[in-house]
Amino acid sequence: MTSKQRAYLRARASGEDTIFQIGKDGISEEMCNQIANALEARELIKLRVLDNAEYSPKEAGEEIASALGAELVTVIGTKFVLYRPSSKEKNRKIDLAAIK
């Protein structure tokens, strides 16, 4: 992913709401399944790590991204953004190939 593509995704994510929170229970298989479903539908999601979690936002983002084949776009404070293109053509909203 190029820096322009990453900047484009950061800008798109700034207006998005946080849809998942990672707390003291950590990252479970069920949570990963839910995040995978959200990525399939939205392609770009924002997550938050609570203060009582055992992970830092960067650690959580890297672990989830590697487990789901997603891209960690950015980490800001307690929040991070993940991107994965949808496998279904009808769900594709973001075209990174147009951004060079």
Image (cartoon, helix red, strand yellow):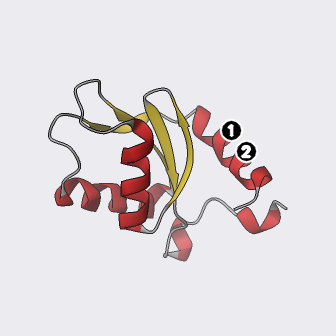
At label 2, counting other C-alpha atoms closer than 10 Å, the crowd grade (few under 14, some 14-19, many 20 or more) is few
53 or 41, nearer to the observer: 53
Pair 1/2: label in front: 2
Q: Secondary structure at mark 2?
A: helix
Q: Amino acid at mark 2?
A: Ala
Question: Tag on residue 76?
Answer: none
Position of 43 compared to 39: left or right?
Answer: right
Task: Indicate the quadrant where residue 64 lies.
Answer: bottom left
Figure quadrant of the N terminus = bottom right
Q: CA distance from mark 1 to mark 2?
A: 6 Å
Task: Indicate the quadrant where residue 85 lies.
Answer: bottom right
Q: Which residue appears farthest toward the left when viewing the image?
A: 25
For the point 48% across and 40% down, which residue is it?
80
Position in image of residue 12 (x %, y %): 64, 42
For the point 52% across and 66% down, which residue is it?
91
Q: How many marks?
A: 2
Q: Which residue is mark 1?
A: 11
